Image (spheres, rainbow, N blue to C red):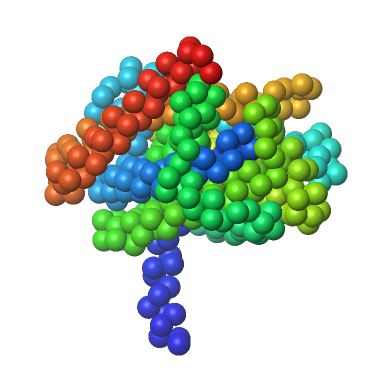
Amino acid sequence: MKGLLRNFWPYLAIIGPGIITSTVDNDASGIATYSVAGAQFGFSLIWTLIPITLLLIVIQEMVARMAVVTGKGLADLIREEFGVKLTLIILVGLFIANLSTTVAEFAGMAAAGELLGISRYIVVPLCALIIWLFIVRSNYKTVEKIFLVLILFYGLYVISGFLAKPDWGEVGRQAIMPSIKFTSSYWFVLVAVVGTSVTPWMQFYLQSSIVEKGLKIEHFKITRWDIIIGSVITSIVALFIIVSAASAVNTEGAVSVENVAKALEPVAGRFASTVFAFGFFMAAFLGAWIVPLSTAYFITEGIGFESGINKSIHEAPQFYILLGTTLFIAAGIILIPGVPLIPIILISQVINALLLPIVLLLVLILINNKRIMKNHSNTKLMNIISVTVLFALVAMGVILVITSFGAG
């Protein structure tokens, strides 16, 4: 037994970035978007989770491969290969999307805290301060361990999904033979689901975290499994969130995570309602760590400053200033009375969905550059799959624009 553990431990030491990046994408924005999808359209959007899982694996595999081969972050490579002007344009778009997402994380903590009987004026500033202090005083290994522990709380959504007692036969049917609707509202939410499941910030965070962890090409087989496991987990969690919302709420009107949590009580009992609310709080809390970290990573790398949790505040001042600025601006915004949560979340996810094809195109160009990737560039099959994914993402954006201006 000791020998088995001794041989298995090196594998556990490599796992982390893939599982964390994928799973944490089910943050406050993700949970709110999946809740809207389930409440407004029942199980009819569950089918999207199958291609989303494959999409996650394909994109993140390429990003991880670039990380272990080059030892550089994605923003760093984009700046070196495409120049400062293009890099700055992308960084501005990503910063807007990430700030909106971080606002949504704190809004999620505020809403969940109030459902659990704690004022937002206590929860929001306290959580912002805790995140800031932990990151400033820790190194990458410590922060990664905290993330892996917090991820366990996503299991609460599996519990709430079973407690809601859905029609599992109908869930299976909608996954295989979905009832697709060609309306602006359906496609808006569909694009938002893709936008919250596969985001540009994930790719920047994943590549930076692999580099900071010090993983090399010899670790890549395990890293690939890390990505596959993380992608499957995130889709399973998303499935149970949609199932919970669809079982508790059935409306074409406005809906929120708070509505879903409250609606679960008469359907599945107060325990299910509390579990859903607490899961929402923990997901938002974890997201408020990682999204600002991603922002600090890609901006400092893109401009050429020192970055990383392993560096002290004196070694990488710009990194920590950006991190703190994103955290405290987002926390401050959500303390303003009457800030609309759901529009902020959905719009930020649609921005992510529209930015993703641009980021993926740059990744494809980089991954096929043999000067950078040497013998580890894409195969023809991988390029065919990646280009198909790229065209599908562009098509979804076009459909969103057309249906938004058409009759609903």
Q: Position of residue 315 (x, y in %)?
A: 48, 39
For the point 48% across and 30% down, which residue is it?
181
Where in the figure is residue 140, as x and y percent of width and height?
Answer: 50, 52
Residue 43's image quarter? Answer: top right
Please indicate whether residue 268 sits to the left or right of residue 143 in the image: right
Q: Is residue 223 visible?
A: no
280 vs 124: above or below: below
Direction from residue 218 to residue 172 in the image, left or right: right
Front position in the image: 287 or 315? 287
Is 380 left, or right, of 182 in this rendering?
Answer: left
On screen, residue 190 above or below 245:
above
Residue sitting at 33 percent across and 56 percent down? 224
Give the image quarter of residue 93. Answer: top left
Query: In this orientation, which residue lies closer to the viewer: 408 or 104?
Result: 408
* Residue 299 drawn at (x, y percent): 44, 29
Q: Extreme top residue here?
A: 405
| Place of residue 66 in the rendered image (x, y in percent of width and height, measured from the top left) | 28, 44
Q: How many marks?
A: 0
Above or below, 86 relative to 116: above
Q: Is residue 87 visible?
A: yes
At a point 81% along the width and 53% down the height, the residue shown is 270
Residue farthest toward the bottom in the current orientation of the protein: 1
The residue located at (76%, 43%) in the rendering is 263
Q: Quadrant of the N terminus?
A: bottom left
